[in-house]
Image: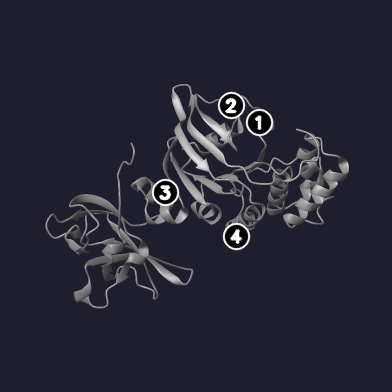
Amino acid sequence: MSGDRLERDHPVGLSVRGVTVRYGAVAALDDVTLEVAAGDVLAVIGPSGSGKSTLLRAIAGLEQLASGVVEAGGRPLDGVPTHRRDLGLMFQDHALFPHLTVAGNVAFGLEMQGWSQPRQRERVVELLDLVGLTSFGDRPITELSGGEAQRVALARALAPAPALLMLDEPFGSLDRVLRRQLTAELSRLLTELDQTALHVTHDQEEAFALADRVAVLRAGRVEQLGRPEDLWTRPVSTFVAEFLGHPNIWPVTVGEDDGVVSLGSAELGRSEQFEPGRRHVVVPAPAVSRAATESQASLSARVQRVVFGEGYYRVLADVLDGEPGTTVTFQVDERLDPGSVVGLVVDTDRLHPVDDDHGR
């Protein structure tokens, strides 16, 4: 592609259907199917080795597909080399060229596409202003902070107005405060530009803050795909619930005749949403509260650890009525002493059932 290409008139969607990537006998990706609507951001999360980066590399044409199809804007990408797939790539290690200035790095892709020098300079100014580095054009890369380097990398990836922006752990090396700041800035930019993007990260908070939808990978397969709020409130499996950080996943029994949900010897209350029998449920921390009186308590627990943060105390306690090793995490406004025993009430309407081995 050559010439001074401007931003496209409308965003382009991405389709991945039945994609499998093998390393010998091992399937790094196993029949992965997902869609990214035009202008949307899809975050891909999962533990190390789940296939996140392999998926990104497969879409970019850096991994050979054993089977499946990748399409961008309805155009199959099979056989299309990486540099002609109209992608913007941004990685954790920046991959900036130390011998070039900030402006030289941002202009690199434009030069490769044959943009004229005047239009390159104009576009570089536009992008540096967009990422908040207006006066940084002549600065050497070696003089940048980590956050500034990430902004330059983002400007370089966005400069050619790619159909799809690919982000592989872009903020993984930054401290938590800066990561939150840059995530908010990136979210604003992607919305402003109506940019289709695929964001690979291990950070659930980052994914939820940035993405329209989130895919959770497990051993090369999509375990769950949905909007952030749906994944959090309705995880399909104990794996997803644990990976997202749900602190309370309990083995309960639901009564055959009365629908009473029991944790060990403690009867938590009735629920009409569960079939009778034994199952695991997710119990959101806000669904557990201190009982006003001893007679109101459906559960008792011994306080193990108390941590203050974001305006409340987060309490980890050992459940005294449940199976050995069962713990409960809940929130209170006042500090509780470790070792003390508290009575708790559980809102059974907020419990969510999860499968132990969804789709396996």
Circles 4 and 1 in contact, beta carbons < 8 Å: no
Tag 4 residue: 177
Tag 1 residue: 82
Tag 3 residue: 243
Q: Quadrant of the N terminus?
A: top right
Residue 73 as seen in the image, left or right of residue 298 = right
Tell me which numbered mark, 4 or 3, is placed earlier along the sequence.
4
Label 3 CA crowd tier, 10 Å (few <14, some 14–19, many 20+): some
The amino acid at mark 2 is Asp
The amino acid at mark 3 is Phe
Q: Is residue 90 above or below residue 208?
A: above
Residue 15 in view in this figure: yes
Q: Position of residue 113 (x, y in %)?
A: 78, 35
Residue at 50% x, 49% y is 213
Label 4 CA crowd tier, 10 Å (few <14, some 14–19, many 20+): few
Callout 4: SS: helix
The amino acid at mark 4 is Val
